Amino acid sequence: MIDIDRIITGFDRGLRTLFAPAASLRPQPGGDLPEGMLSREDKRLSAALMRINHSGEICAQALYQGQAMTAKNREIADSLEQASWEETEHLCWTENRIKELGGRKSLFNPLWYAGSLAIGAGVGLIGDKWNLGFLAETERQVERHLAGHLERLPLADLKSRAVVEQMKYDEIQHASMAVSLGGARLPFPARILMQLSSKAMTGITYWV
């Protein structure tokens, strides 16, 4: 049975995710580093990449919340909610870095959030092992995505690189958590579909 209290809490968190500044218990990675000598083009590139990462965290929040709402096992639901709170720190860090670079967040964030929430809730209804498997695969793909950003970020942008490196480490931990709780390996077509969807989202978010 779907927990109504979780739905109400999830709705409230959704509004906060989209419209309220995120908070972080941990200090922002690279916060004590000096701002690098970045050209206008370097700043534009870094801001665009951080905008993608910020939207990715919007999606992560929605996925976790949707999955937690429909998870059948209370322990698994609690673990998903805990991971969601940890991802909130990534939301805070990327938003702060976008501001520092003089960039802006994606105009499509409400759309990304709604779609991801629906996907997360739908996967949760299928069963906990697939719910966790979907989470693990998502985090693996995010890890690879962040590794690609580390290759593209300007070398002088040490502050952005520090944020991305910590995010990458955290995503690895979340994937391991999902597997340890019983996540199943998703079929190959499902993994490819996820990759294509992610590519479309990141391509749009880079510019808008």
Image (spheres, rainbow, N blue to C red):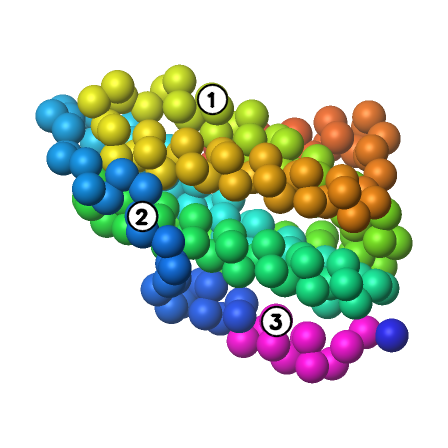
Residue under the image location 84 percent in, 59 percent down: 125
Rendered location of residue 4, percent (x, y):
74, 81
Please, what is the three-letter code of the amino acid marked with disc 3? Answer: Gly
Q: Nearer the viewer, mark 3 or mark 2?
A: 2
Give the residue displayed 79% in from the left and 67% down from the top.
Answer: 74
Front-lying residue, 162 or 188: 162
The C terminus lies in quadrant: top left
| Residue 114, image quadrant | bottom right
How far separated are the C-alphas under marks 1 and 2?
21 Å
Give the magenta part as a residue range.
2-12
Mark 3 vs 2: CB contact within 8 A: no
Q: Are marks 1 and 3 in contact (CB under 8 Å)?
A: no
The residue singled out by tag 3 in the image is 10
Q: On the image, numbered disc 1 is attached to which residue?
A: 148
Up-down: is 164 above or below 26?
A: above
Q: Which mark is residue 28?
A: 2
Does residue 195 appear left or right of residue 16 in this picture? right
- Looking at the rendered structure, the secondary structure element under dot 1 is helix
Give me the residue at 49% from left, 48% from top: 57
Q: Residue at x 31, y 51 (%)?
A: 27
Is-magenta flag for residue 198?
no
Spatial CA distance of label 1 from label 3 is 31 Å
Q: Main secondary structure of the magenta part?
A: helix
Between the residue at mark 3 and the residue at mark 2, the CA separation in whole angstroms equals 25 Å
* First reached walking from the N terminus: tag 3 or tag 2: 3
* Residue 42 appears anywhere in the view: yes
Position of residue 95 relative to residue 134, above or below, is: below
Mark 3 Cα shell of 10 Å, populated few (<14), some (14-19), many (≥20)? many
Amino acid of disc 1:
Gly
Amino acid beneath label 2? Gln
